[in-house]
Amino acid sequence: MNKINSFEELNKIYQEYKSSLDIRKATAIDGFVCEKNNYKKEILICGGTGCKSAQSDLIKDNLEKEISKLDLEDEVYVSITGCFGFCEKGPIVKVTPDDVFYVHVTPEDAEEIINEHIVNGNVVQRLLYEEPTIKEKVKTQDEMTFYKKQVRIALRNCGLINPENIDEYIAEKGYLALGKCLTECTPDDVINVILKSGLRGRGGGGFPTGKKWQFAKGYDADQKYIICNADEGDPGAFMDRSI
């Protein structure tokens, strides 16, 4: 990736790659094609720790092999994505824009998913989640009680983008706020936004982040440092690493 030298260049990447994620967000529409890359289907495979330990990487390899056998590389895209959050049911595979959610997938299931679902348009019923409240198989996350009341904030992109693809992150407005701060805002503008947001530290004190920044800006020094605590010492805070 080339160096980004301005907010305009960053915004251009955002506009260019945004459409490549539309297929993942769209509902099932006959004839839907992603404008940027012409993919008719995308297959998202959970790349979280639990699913990886259960061979999700091999599932990806097998899916790509089956797609290659049928010369469907230009129509079907396979991607690893962040944890879907339902590790008990992993490995998880999601097909978009059909919005079909498969659970407990194995590498041996790849051939059936491609031939039955992708080629013939038939959902593989045996791989669907059984909703315990109705004791019936359901196709989508929206139909699952587990997900219905969840509102993801910091982890909202998990299950949507490939965490190792910076273009996909930018397509989800990654770095846009940073770019604006560096090119259009004054330090006081940035501090005021953080103060108004009510953002607090995640430690026991919950100290207002904007206040910390305000104090740092007001301190007279030739050199200042920013320290990011990216890995908590508390073993129970392992989930922070996904942020």
Image: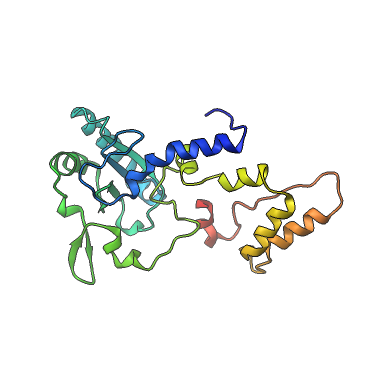
The residue located at (14%, 43%) in the rendering is 116
Q: Is residue 199 visible?
A: no
Horizontal side of 112 relative to 15 (left or right) equals left
Can residue 174 be seen here? The reply is yes
Left or right? Give the position of 159 relative to 154.
left
Count of numbered marks: 0
In this rendering, the answer to whether 212 lies above or below 15 is: below
Please tell me which residue lies in front, 200 or 34: 34
* Rendered location of residue 142, percent (x, y): 30, 61
Give residue 179's position: percent from left, percent from top: 61, 43
Residue at 36 percent across and 45 percent down: it is 22
Query: As drawn, is 230 to the left or to the right of 216?
Result: left
Instruction: Return the residue nearer the eye: 123 or 214.
Output: 214
User: Residue sitting at 28 percent across and 64 percent down?
Assistant: 144
Q: How is the image coloured?
A: rainbow
**Residue 29 appears left or right of 168:** left
Residue 96, given in percent of the width and then of the height, sits at 28, 46
Q: Position of residue 235 (x, y in %)?
A: 54, 59
